[in-house]
Image: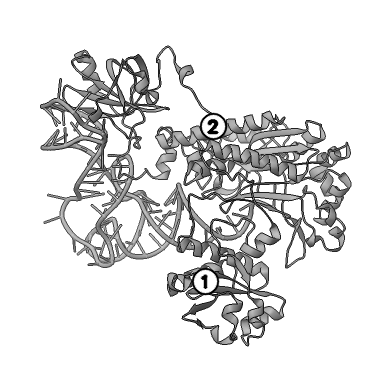
Amino acid sequence: MTTTTEHLATTHRTDLCGALRLSDVGRHVRLGGWVHRSRDLGGLAFVDLRDRAGIVQVSFDPKSCPPDVCAAAAAVGQETVVLIEGDVVARPEAMRNSELASGDVEVRATSFTVVGPATPPAIPVARSRTENLAAEELRLRHRFLDLRRPELQENIILRHRLMQVTRQFLSERGYFEIETPILTKPTPEGARDYLVPSRVHPGEFYALPQSPQLYKQLLMVSGFDRYFQIARCFRDEDLRQDRQPEFTQIDIEASFISAEDIMTMAEGLISALWREGGRDVPSTGFPRMTYAETMERYGSDRPDLRYELEIIDASSAFRGADFAITRSALEQGGRVRGIRIPGGAAALSRKHQDEIEADAKKAGAMGLLRLKYVNGALEGPIAKFLGEGAAAALGLQDGDLALFVAGPDRISSPALDRVRQDVARRMNLVSEAESRFLWVTDFPLFDKDPATGALAAVHHPFTAPMSEDTALLDSAPEQVRAQAYDLTFNGTELGGGSIRISNPVVQSRMFALLGIDDATAEARFGFLLEGLRAGAPPHGGIAFGFDRIAMKLSNAGSLRDVIAFPKTTAARALFEGAPAPVPAADLSDLHISINGDHGGSA
RNA sequence: GGGGGCGUAGCUCAGUUUGGUUAGAGCACUCGACUGUCACUCGAGAGGUCGCGGGUUCGAACCCCGUCGCUCCCGCCA
């Protein structure tokens, strides 16, 4: 998607600063912008003028410019908004600036007008090469200044382009963009809701949507057939680097489709977005793997495929070993699984291994069993328990290190996932330039609480089971697979979706399995059930985390760098000062009183 | 809810380990000089509740306790 600048000419300006090139030489132009920097050489002065297109150098030469104009330009302060008029000239070879896109030309000014006087900026917009960014707190407090930085401008502009590509791609394929409510019904499940008190209904509340899930299903029931929305979603949970309380997702739903249809469409959309971001995409389609296989090979449902380090099952090698830890794990039906690290014996010091083990313990493992294969011999505390052929059976090469976890898979998988990521990072096996997509399919429908045996929906309670597994719903629900799919990229989840339950009888049964009785189901999700009973087409969809995609494609280090006005990790908006206390009278109108010492009014 | 890091001039940082005269540097700012710079250069100047509160001490930016803010992580995020 290209943007031309010809439509940006106005009564005040003819061109954008950063867009001027050699082809403009000889033209008389009017520009408006912010003073990025200025250099007064005494008599001769330069101003670097900045707008959304970039920076151009404007020169003020007494030979071609009235003295009062030169003097005004020489005295101008940073970030002042000025209008200038002048001629585009080619710079002599020796005076070109290759660091500037407009560096082959400059504008020789004939007039200079301050239209937006500026106090010195509280945080720098033009930064010296060695100076760090201002503290995050200050960047958020003075957001309008931070957003002037070319890096953030690029991010926000890329975000816009990604949004337009999304709209165009989906609209061309028959998807209607339909808005769903921001004031919705509170949902007791899942993340905490942001609640909005109702003035006209004392004691009742709206909730801001965590996702438009139920609305988009009802749109399918209504026959719109294909829907999308670039939807704002809200979750009142603690924040992370890649998590904001309000975030944007590309929300998609379609009727009379299969999981296959959705995945094909989604690959096209993601490919279009990646190309817009200037990235390569695989020409052969995105690889797929079942959930069971990703857990077996990587211990995670969003494995980073940029490096190997696959998990191996070492149970048979340990089967006869007279070693209490592995023997009891095997006797209790667990396994010994591990990761073979080529060259790890030398590359990972004892200290590194200790740190990796500490992380594995944080992930739930009791410990790591270490085995080295050096100069044709096994080394390490467990070597003596293993038989002659163990190295060969485990596939160990000279110089390898292997790290094992003994126990049930639900312990070893997350621990080895952590070990895998740790080792890859420490041994520099992660190539930042590489792009590895992966569809993960065949998720289990339910997650069974090992303590209580209670079932919880892995995805959400509207996800359809695989038709061939429906017979297991009553006998062995934890074995039922869902018609659900996630798309991962380099170890992070970009989005996920499912085919939904379109049969009201199946939906009711699903609620029952989740321990939601009929009365509760009707109270919470009655409007969905009624809709399904009114005749629902088979339907399904997917949702992508739009901010996260923008973050990946702009190489931003934080979600905050691709959102114009983000919140802090305490969910505050430092610029405008939200949230804020409100006058007691407003609370009274809303039938609300504040407990304890949190009271007070604005 | 828990743990780690950070908080010194408008901004970026040094100084805190081992308490000791008037808390320094670069950028920005003000004044002056300079006609091809592009992080212009040079000279001069102004600018500080050392996040806040309390304690220890003859003496605290520095040690102790508490607290606030930002940030990263765990929990949480169907």
Q: Residues within 10 Å of mark 2 (few under 14, many from 20)?
A: few
Q: Which mark is residue A85?
A: none
A281 or A145: nearer the viewer: A281
Element type at mark 1 = helix
Residue A554 in the image, given as x and y percentages of width and height:
49, 41
Q: Identify the residue position indicated by label 1 in the image.
A: A357
B43 or A556: nearer the viewer: A556
Would residue A249 be visible to someone looking at this image?
no
For residue A330, which quarter of the picture?
bottom right
Q: Residue at x 34, y 22 (%)?
A: A22
Residue A343 in the image, given as x and y percentages of width and height:
47, 70
- Judged left or right of residue B7, residue A261 is right
Element type at mark 2 = helix
Question: Which quarter of the rendering shows the N terminus of chain A?
Answer: top right
- Alpha carbon separation for disc pair 2 and 1: 44 Å
Q: Residues within 10 Å of mark 1 (few under 14, many from 20)?
A: many
Would residue A20 be visible to someone looking at this image?
yes
Q: Identify the residue position indicated by label 2 in the image.
A: A160
A165 or A465: nearer the viewer: A165
Residue A43 in the image, given as x and y percentages of width and height:
16, 21
- The amino acid at mark 2 is His
Q: Residue at x 55, y 38 (%)?
A: A275
For residue A499, which quarter of the picture?
top right
Q: Residue at x 51, y 34 (%)?
A: A158
Q: Are marks 2 and 1 in contact (CB under 8 Å)?
A: no
Q: Residue at x 51, y 73 (%)?
A: A401
Residue A495 in the image, given as x and y percentages of width and height:
64, 46
Color theme of the render: one colour
- Judged left or right of residue A339, residue A91 is left
